[in-house]
Amino acid sequence: MTAPAETPRPGATTTVDPAEIARFSKLSAEWWDPKGKMAPLHKINPLRLGYIRDAACAKFARNPRSLTCLDGLRVLDIGCGAGLLCEPLARLGAQVVGVDPSESNIAAARLHAERAHLSVDYRCTTVEAIDPHERFDIVLAMEVVEHVTDVGAFLGHCAALMKPAGLMVVSTLNRTWKSFALAIVGAEYVLRWLPRGTHQWDKFVTPDELAHHLAASRLIVTDQVGVIYNPLADRWSISARDLDVNYMVTAEAES
């Protein structure tokens, strides 16, 4: 049985939305099914992994072609779900801690890692409850900020867990009419890639807003790219210009 989620540290307020936890907990059994309700995440996952790997290798002077290019780096994946990013990062040599407030998601993550003979430190907890003395080389918040109750507070907690020379990678959805049409109407209602209600458009975060929140935690954006979908090729790719829907950023501490 998975242990209950840890409570925030005294004085720390939680940014977790219980309704979001319940929504994603219902999908726990389908996280690792590439043809199930998480199919879009499986298709985009190699792109996310490549972006994180390349950013980390550039930051820490590693060879991205090495099969163990992240060897020894401590990585925190916040809102890890059932571990779709944690496992490939562990295969690249990273010491991965995956946290998620959903007990069923963590249970699914642990089971899959055990079957894959991978060592990942999965914890049913929140970013606010992590020991403040822990520090990580890389902190990931992938498709998370659009689901929390307070983006600024959430990113502040993330930043506090970074090493001084650490790296943060964030992916989220831009709040534009294009994202409403494609990410909600298209993905949830027309194509039915995701269960209806997965996203709330008013909680999407623009790149400027994200940069502002990061700056409040003394982090600066060092790179940002869009993630676009080609329906004819059924393929996701990175765009240097089109940040209208999905996008990713890297951030580092101010010098």
Image (tube, rainbow, N blue to C red):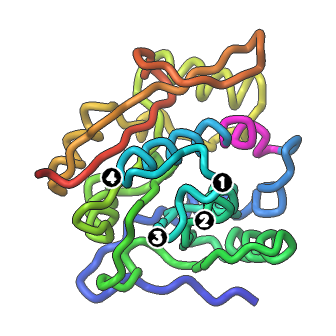
Observer-nearest residue: 233 or 50?
A: 50
Q: Are marks 1 and 4 in contact (CB under 8 Å)?
A: no
Q: Residue at x 39, y 44 (%)?
A: 58
**Quadrant of the image for the N terminus?**
bottom right
Q: CA distance from mark 4 to mark 3?
A: 24 Å
Q: Nearer the viewer, mark 4 or mark 2?
A: 2
Observer-nearest residue: 50 or 150?
A: 50
Q: Residues within 10 Å of mark 1 (few under 14, many from 20)?
A: few
Q: Residues within 10 Å of mark 2 (few under 14, many from 20)?
A: some
Q: Quadrant of residue 47?
A: top right
Residue 157, x across and y down, in percent: 30, 67
Q: Is residue 64 magenta?
A: no
Residue 151 badge:
4
Observer-nearest residue: 20 or 109?
A: 109
Q: CA distance from mark 4 to mark 2?
A: 30 Å
- Secondary element at image label 2: loop
Amino acid marked by disc 1:
Leu
Q: Nearer the viewer, mark 1 or mark 4?
A: 1
Residue 67 badge:
1
- Prevailing secondary structure class for the magenta stretch in the rendered image: helix
Residue 38, x across and y down, in percent: 76, 45
- Give the left or right position of residue 109, taking residue 253 as reference: right
The part of the chain drawn in magenta is 37-45
Q: Are marks 1 and 3 in contact (CB under 8 Å)?
A: no
Disc 3 designates what residue?
74
Disc 2 designates what residue?
93
Amino acid marked by disc 3:
Arg
Q: Is residue 43 magenta?
A: yes
Q: CA distance from mark 1 to mark 2?
A: 8 Å
Q: Are marks 4 and 2 in contact (CB under 8 Å)?
A: no
- Secondary element at image label 3: strand
